[in-house]
Amino acid sequence: MSGAQAHVLVNADVRTLNDGGDRAEAIAWKNGRIVAVGTRAEVELAAGPQAECVDLGGATVLPGFIDAHHHPGIVALYGGVVRLVPPVVTDIRSLQEALAARAAVTEPGAWVVATNWDEHLLAEGRAPTRDELDDAVPDHPLFAMHYTCHRAATNSRGLEAAGIGKDTPEPAGGAILRGKGGLPTGILVERAFCGVETLARRSLIARDPEGFLRRLAAHYRTMAEAGITRVVDATVPPDVMTLYRESARRGDVLVPTMMLPVSDASYLQEPWDIIGGPLPQDGDGELLTTGPIKLVFDGVPGCAMCLSWWQAFGATLRSFGLAVARGTFEPIRTALSLGPQLGSDLKLRTGIRMYHTEEAARIVRAASDRGFAVATHAIGNEAVEIAVAAYAEVPEASDLRGLRRLEHACFLDLALIRKIADVGAAVVSQPELVRLPTLAHAASIPGLRYMPHRWLLDAKVKLVGSSDHPVAGLDPLEGVRAAVDRRTVRGHAHEPDQAIDLDEALLMYTRTAAEVCGVLDRCGTLEAGKRADLVVLDVPLDGQTLASAKVASTIIGGAWIAPAAEA
Ligand SMILES: [Zn+2]
């Protein structure tokens, strides 16, 4: 359906999202490239008399969406494992039954792998104990990933396989939770679970590489149908990269993909093996490319925060006010669970930090010397501060594969935003995280904002949209809605002063994303000469129709993916 045939869309609201914000009524493409954007007469002339023409009845055409932080590899890796979620899993007993059922059909010695447990969704309101996990899975090592992907539960065989025992020291940037006599409870937090995660990943891949490739191909179709025409996988260890290359060899990479490499020893570890390893060969440099190295600077949900006493005091007071107003004490529990520590500078620090500033600068410099940009996961303001300080110390890499990035950058104040602007780092945000249930009761911290999109744009920081799927849903239109309305699951707008308008939100998923990924010369706007990566919506898009607008069809490199517009 692509090839030499020219295609024309007429009677459309074509939003080019170029510098001038130009709009047009028609667009044409041929051989995978846009040949004309303009009036119907101009475009039909450029496309020639043989062109296939579709009348859109006024519906909107946008540049294809770019999801700059997504995890297709995690979807493919864990797509076949047990999901410990309701309605099947509602308490410890049903969790044990689900694990035991999987163990019964898992070959001896292989890892039983599960995901998505959440103690708040279990009737007991706590994590399972090691004894409970041993009862359910006595003969296999077990890896059960928490829904945050930043902690895990394992059984005695899992601990043994990873060499974690009573005398294992606490890893920097992680915690081995312990019970009586210092015995590990089986709950491993942040860097403490790298060992079990890596072993479980290798076991899954070795057992069923075809399953991985099948699920990856299916996920590419799901993304394309949602209007995603380019994606960044934010966590790609070497073995998953090998599977991506195989997927490309088979012609299954439907959506051009940029991979952010992480260490073979898990995404939370320092990626020295990547920095010191062979430089990636990117083939044709279009379908499958290697991007910045991914670094993780703080925990989830224990992100690295630094608050003055008045900010902490103000946050607690506001939590109390919210609790009274809403008749719930959940906000107070949330505030107190931060577990703050008072530093010698009289500032309160909370959460888990993986790198000190010097370590951070050392690794950013080494990556830069090797020609890699970096994409740093930093949620809390302290983690962002460390990343920005490291970026400031290291001149930018000569061979940039995309710009330097800050992933998430959730809690920021105006001074920190100025520093982000000064070092020229892009912020890759996930607007839909405003719908996380925990945020429905969250109080604002004085001076800080959560995902301060308005402040970032006003400071001229390059602000990019993304999903972090499977952490949140993958629909870019839902991300656009969340950036515009900032509504929580309880229906109120969270920090409404940070809302941005529709056009600004669209740019996050198109032009700015292309710029930050280093591909603005070939996509991100609708202009003659660029790749024909387009999204056709089912309505003319405006503030009113945004709520219900859907993707009617997607065109990637000139090829129709969901040819609804032809029907
Ligand atoms: Zn992520």
Image (spheres, rainbow, N blue to C red):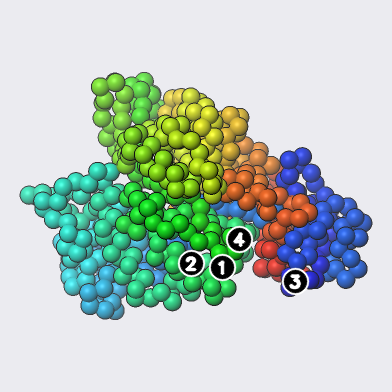
Q: Are marks 2 and 1 in contact (CB under 8 Å)?
A: yes
Disc with the residue nearer the chain's start (4 vs 2): 2
Disc with the residue nearer the chain's start (1 vs 3): 3
Is residue 36 toward the left or the right of residue 229 in the image?
right
Q: From this viewpoint, is residue 84 visible? A: no
Disc with the residue nearer the chain's start (4 vs 1): 1
Quadrant in which the C terminus is drawn: bottom right
Horizontal and vertical percent position of residue 465: 57, 46
Q: Are marks 4 and 3 in contact (CB under 8 Å)?
A: no
Q: How far apart are the two marked residues, 3 and 2, measured between alpha carbons?
A: 25 Å
Q: Amino acid at mark 2?
A: Tyr
| Residue ID at (11%, 53%) | 166
| Residue ID at (29%, 21%) | 345
Q: How far apart are the two marked residues, 4 and 3, measured between alpha carbons?
A: 17 Å
Q: Amino acid at mark 1?
A: Val
Q: Which structural element holds mark 4?
A: loop
Label drawn at residue 3:
3
Label drawn at residue 253:
1
Residue corresponding to mark 2: 244
Q: Which structural element holds mark 1?
A: loop
Horizontal and vertical percent position of residue 134: 17, 65
Q: Are marks 4 and 1 in contact (CB under 8 Å)?
A: no
Q: Amino acid at mark 3?
A: Gly
Estimate how packed mark 1 is, as few (under 14), some (14 to 19) or many (20 or more) residues with alpha carbons within 10 Å: many
Front in this rendered view, residue 540 or 532: 532
